[in-house]
Image (spheres, rainbow, N blue to C red):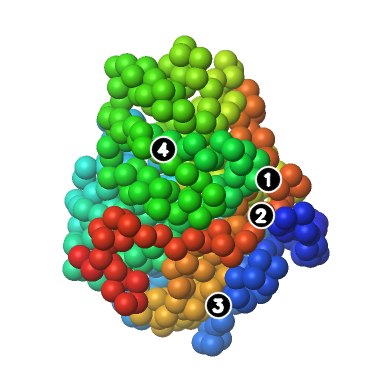
Amino acid sequence: MLTFKGVRVKNGFRWAVVVGAAFVLLASACGSGRSDGASGTTSDSSGAATTTGATFGALESPCGPGTPSGTPDKGVTDTSITLGYGDDAGYQPLPGLSHEMSDAMKAMIGWCNDQGGINGRQISGDYHDAAITDVNNAMTEACAKDFFLVGQGWALDSAQEQTRQGCGLPTVAGYAVSPQFANAPNKWEPVGVPADYMVTSAASQLAARFPDAVKKAGVMYSNYAANVDTKDKVVATFPQAGWSFLDCPQEYNAAGESDWKPFVQKLKDCGAEIVYWSGTPYPSMENMLTAADQLDYHPIWLADTNAYNQAFSQWNASGFADNVYFRNAAIPFEEAGDNPATQQYLDLVKANGGDVDPLGVQSTSAFLLWATAAKACGDDLTRACVAGQLANVHDWTGGGLHASSDPGANLPTDCGILMKMEGTTFVRVTPEQPGTFDCNPAYATKASGPVLDRAKLDANRISQL
């Protein structure tokens, strides 16, 4: 098994830690106050589980044989566990949307079952296609028979919540979009960004590189609710990293525009030297960047992690996206050869005939988080037991897939990698050393403004429908 050194970098100061099997983030190095558990594993007091000797990166596999009995909860028999998962692949304008999440779940379910399942119970995968607009129907199906919903990603997740909470279905989601779901009860996430926080590592990293440009910042976002929420959080939090936003926000149609030049021209006339973009990389951002080049407008662009997309990089043979930066909370695929967890994800999914994507990494981590908690419950596998175990996980990296986060308390990571496009290649910018993250407690920035009004959080940071 590979070993290597992980180095966490902040302001030129480095902490080196030798770890086995994968790069493990030490929370004390970033001052987050979290425990130093290598993978966020929970304890098993039942004694029912046995280990197979398998691992996922730095994480001991939560899967293995056992001698289960009984039907302790919905979706659980003495031989099986019905686990729900899903995506928006059936959305006709963008066929296959987010299917990499389900590809990852299928691979991980097979990987786990090959080892004996969870304490001897085989996992039966129950796929749900929300196709964006059918999310409530998908949730109704899941409510009917699933023990847990794991690794799913549904773009209109606010529309599901009344149904999900009504049937008491808990979830370890691949991602959350709406503030109503990001801070919902009975919901956990391996790499979450709750409604009341924003990860601002990229804002600070770009401010250090382009201190003058961030004083003249613009925003461009679609009229889709999730993009509006993200834009509002950016405008509320980035000034703490030194950004100043000009009074010329540009809202475009989520379905695209027939002519992007008027939007680009307004940003150019406004004097925006750096622009935060919230939306899809293709075709919208590609069309916008083409229009920007035609108008000889070349600001710095900051996009979301969805810019880390192979189709987007291949499109950039023209170089129009060479000034596009984005934040990454996971070890880049280009560094998989030195990071066992990332390599294992790529190998498992490809061997199962699936496609890989950063969203798939999140689903993989979600599965491992759920499985680790489920293993700890032993034979008496109930939703309440798994929920209790999840609530106690405060330092989670998915075996080294991504930066440490706190799913038990629904707190985000305070680490990030700044990446950019250079032709058809993705390049690590900050920190430069492979396998490392730039971490600072200030990067987990408390949000304010209209998003919190929409989230309607109570004193425990739980959204109220």
Counting residues from the start of the chain, the first of labels 1 and 3 encountered is 3
For the residue pair 232 and 20, the one nearer the viewer reads as 232
Q: CA distance from mark 1 to mark 3?
A: 32 Å
Counting residues from the start of the chain, the first of labels 1 and 2 encountered is 1
The percent position of residue 34, horizontal first and vertical second, equals 59, 74
Amino acid type of the residue tagged 3 in the rendering: Thr
Q: CA distance from mark 1 to mark 2?
A: 7 Å
SS class, disc 1:
strand
Residue where numbered disc 2 is placed: 438
SS class, disc 3:
loop
Residue where numbered disc 4 is placed: 246
Amino acid type of the residue tagged 2 in the rendering: Asp
Q: CA distance from mark 4 to mark 3?
A: 47 Å
Counting residues from the start of the chain, the first of labels 4 and 2 encountered is 4
Residue where numbered disc 1 is placed: 430
The percent position of residue 146, horizontal first and vertical second, equals 30, 63
Q: CA distance from mark 3 to mark 2?
A: 27 Å
Q: Which residue is at 37% across, 17% downward?
A: 261
Amino acid type of the residue tagged 4 in the rendering: Leu
Residue where numbered disc 3 is placed: 42
Q: Which residue is at 45% across, 77% downward?
A: 391
